[in-house]
Image (tube, rainbow, N blue to C red):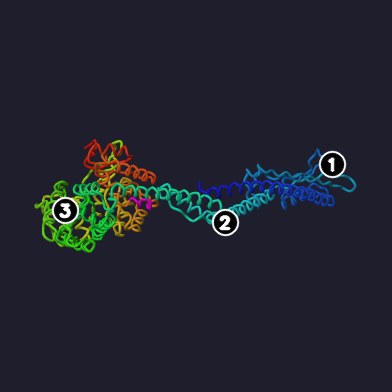
């Protein structure tokens, strides 16, 4: 029961108690007063009437007329004249019982008369005939007007108490709302903590509320500090096990895991390039320049690679002491990439190298999704070796897959995607995401597009990069949302869809998504929405706005491909995320990588501290599955994950 309802109940109880007490006291006092007045009236009337009768002749007619006149003009229950002994009635007038309640007095309920009876004593007067006693006159006034006065007084008392209670209740409600206004902030903060959003609020002026707010702020600050410390520790651990100590780039093991995951991912671009750079004569340089100078040269080379204008998903790593590599998904022009690499490397380390060694060999291997990693590396080595053997070390390009799908210009892709949207050629694939005990958490539903003119299914990696350039990605996401709701109507399992950063930043798309969630509340509770990890940090304002808009409607929101921004994960303590999906590159061969095991165990711990489910992507086999479960992961998906109904 709310405080306002409790206030009204208290006012009602107090008012009833006060009214009851006042009613009893005032009614009893009024009744005593009325009884006293009636007794005096009866005595005075009897005395006056007896005196008048004494002065008149005592014949029966005169006596009868006098009694009748007095009875008819006043309000009596009876008037009786008896002989002096009181045994014989000389004359008498009685009120007809049927006339009771028909007087001019207001109508009074019978229960009120029974509850508060009014008793008045009869008045007596003595009638004389000369010096002799003639008789005794006895009369009693009726009590209708006394009851009417008592009843109307009680009603007025009740009315004033009701008005007073209403005014006091309204004033108390207003004052209580003002006093409890800080409580709304306390409730919002408590609700936020329950939703895994550890926010802080300003302490109100009310001491009782301020104590609660300060305690909750302390809890939020401790959780925030703990998350920040744990995130920093994990980031330090990640860099130690995944990055080269000298250059700061990804080490060979993790870089190749990223490349392998990209080659197998349906959401990655359909093709790209792997560029390899070799710093020749490293041992000689180390002897000539010294270790410190050579290490600085390696860092400059890494900085030069990082300074390239990079696209989405580009990754740079150090393969060994002399070789560096750049994975460039969706690099449609390898010649342009080769030229940019040569210019950037010359700018970064050209002046730091001895004369005659300023040209660095560059080999580029083009690939298509699904190509084997060893084949790609072999072609990259061939191109790099050819560049190293040529005068001036010009960049060399090696085509891994000469049967690649021919490229289409921007206008062609815009027409192709628009036609597919108009014809309803977009659909959703379905892959299970299982819990640690094998139960189905949800069905992951990535988008697919059927070519409008060819019998082929195109994955998200084939279509979405071009859709982004054409500005059609929000329309595709809206089609995905419609298909997801249709799928939810057909099956009881939750469905997970991917929402792009572009759509997240598109206010109209978010509004339409929220409208659909409101229209189908039951389906909304079974909808999971994946957002890219980078979207939460590059567009933090829009990301938080999206969470505020759609999370209250029941759906779950999480991040996918998590791994590179782990040092900032604590910044999401106040968003209310539901889950994290860890990148496939981090779980690849996890059963054979103790360093990554420590890192992922810590990542699962910090996720659980924030109240999040931690799900692994790209699980390839049973060994990885078992190891991830042992590390505390709550869910798993990938080629090695099969549901019992598959």
Q: Which mark is residue 271?
A: 3
- 10 Å crowding of disc 2: few (<14), some (14-19), many (20+): few
* CB within 8 Å, label 2 to label 3: no
Residue 433 % position (x, y)? 27, 42
Quarter of the image that includes the C terminus: top left
Q: Is residue 430 left or right of residue 172?
A: left
Judging from the image, what secondary structure is the residue with disc 2 in?
A: helix
Residue bearing the label numbered 1: 84
Magenta highlight on residue 541? no
Residue 481 appears in the rendering: no
* Mark found first going from the N terminus, 2 or 1: 1
Residue 40 appears in the rendering: yes
User: Real-space Cα distance between discs 2 and 1?
Assistant: 68 Å
Magenta highlight on residue 570? yes
Judging from the image, what secondary structure is the residue with disc 3 in?
A: strand
Mark 2 or 1: the one toward you: 2
User: Real-space Cα distance between discs 2 and 3?
Assistant: 72 Å
Residue bearing the label numbered 2: 171
Q: Is residue 408 left or right of residue 209?
A: left
Residue nearest the viewer, comparing 324 with 641: 324
User: Real-space Cα distance between discs 1 and 3?
Assistant: 135 Å
Q: Quadrant of residue 306?
A: bottom left
Query: Which span of residues is magenta-colored?
Result: 566-572
* CB within 8 Å, label 1 to label 3: no
Mark 1 or 3: the one toward you: 3
* Mark found first going from the N terminus, 1 or 3: 1
């Amino acid at each position: 029961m709310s405080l306002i309802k409790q206030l009204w109940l208290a006012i009602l109880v107090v008012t009833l108690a006060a009214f009851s007490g006042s009613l009893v006291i005032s009614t009893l006092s009024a009744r005593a007063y009325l009884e006293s007045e009636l007794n005096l009236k009866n005595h005075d009337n009897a005395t006056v009437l007896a005196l008048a009768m004494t002065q008149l002749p005592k014949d029966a007619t005169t006596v009868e007329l006098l009694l009748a006149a007095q009875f008819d003009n006043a309000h009596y229950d009876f008037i009786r004249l008896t002989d002096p002994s009181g045994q014989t009635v000389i004359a008498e007038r009685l009120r007809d019982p049927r006339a009771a309640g028909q007087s001019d007095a207001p109508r009074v309920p019978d229960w009120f008369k029974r509850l508060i009876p009014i008793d008045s004593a009869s008045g007596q007067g003595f009638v004389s005939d000369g010096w002799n006693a003639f008789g005794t006159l006895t009369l009693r006034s009726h009590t209708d007007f006394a009851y009417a006065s008592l009843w109307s007084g009680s009603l007025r008392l009740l009315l004033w108490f009701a008005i007073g209670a209403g005014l006091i209740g309204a004033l108390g409600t207003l004052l209580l709302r003002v006093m409890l206004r800080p409580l709304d902030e306390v409730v919002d903060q408590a609700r936020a903590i329950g939703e895994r959003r550890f926010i802080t609020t300003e302490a109100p002026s009310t001491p009782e509320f301020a104590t609660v707010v300060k305690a909750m702020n302390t809890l939020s600050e401790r959780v925030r500090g703990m998350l920040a410390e744990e995130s920093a520790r994990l980031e330090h651990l990640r860099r130690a096990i995944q990055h080269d100590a000298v250059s700061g780039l990804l080490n060979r093991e993790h870089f190749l895991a990223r490349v392998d995951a990209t080659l197998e991912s349906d959401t990655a671009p359909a093709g790209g390039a792997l560029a390899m750079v070799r710093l020749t004569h490293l041992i000689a340089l180390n002897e000539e320049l010294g270790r410190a100078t050579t290490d600085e040269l390696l860092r400059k080379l890494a900085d030069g690679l990082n300074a390239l204008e990079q696209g989405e998903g580009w990754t740079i790593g150090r393969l060994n002491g002399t070789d560096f590599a750049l994975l460039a998904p969706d690099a449609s022009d390898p010649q342009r990439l080769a030229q940019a690499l040569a210019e950037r490397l010359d700018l970064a380390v050209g002046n730091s190298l001895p004369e005659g060694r300023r040209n660095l060999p560059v080999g580029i291997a083009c690939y298509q999704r699904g190509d084997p990693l060893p084949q790609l590396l072999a072609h990259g080595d061939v191109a790099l070796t050819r560049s190293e053997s040529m005068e001036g070390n010009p960049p060399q390009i090696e085509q891994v897959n000469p049967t690649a799908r021919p490229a289409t210009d921007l206008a062609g892709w815009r027409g192709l995607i628009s036609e597919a949207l108009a014809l309803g050629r977009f659909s959703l694939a379905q892959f299970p995401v299982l819990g640690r005990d094998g139960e189905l958490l949800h069905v992951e539903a990535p988008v697919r597009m059927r070519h409008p003119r060819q019998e082929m299914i195109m994955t998200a990696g084939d279509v979405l990069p071009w859709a982004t350039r054409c500005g059609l990605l929000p329309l595709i996401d809206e089609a995905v949302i419609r298909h997801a709701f249709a799928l939810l109507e057909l099956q009881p399992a939750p469905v997970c869809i991917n929402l792009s950063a572009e759509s997240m930043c598109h206010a109209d798309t978010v509004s339409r998504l929220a409208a659909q969630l409101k229209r189908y509340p039951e389906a909304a509770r079974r909808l999971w929405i994946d957002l890219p990890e980078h979207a939460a940090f590059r567009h933090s304002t829009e990301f938080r706005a999206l969470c505020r808009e759609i999370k209250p409607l029941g759906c779950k929101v999480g991040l996918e491909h998590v791994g590179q921004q782990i040092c900032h994960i604590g910044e999401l303590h106040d968003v209310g995320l539901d889950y994290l999906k860890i990148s496939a590159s981090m779980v690849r061969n996890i059963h054979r990588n103790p360093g990554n095991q420590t890192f992922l165990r810590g990542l699962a711990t910090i996720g659980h501290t924030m109240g999040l489910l931690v799900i692994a992507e790209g699980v390839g086999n049973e060994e990885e599955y078992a190891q991830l479960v042992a590390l505390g992961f709550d869910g798993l998906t990938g080629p090695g994950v099969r549901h019992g109904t598959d």
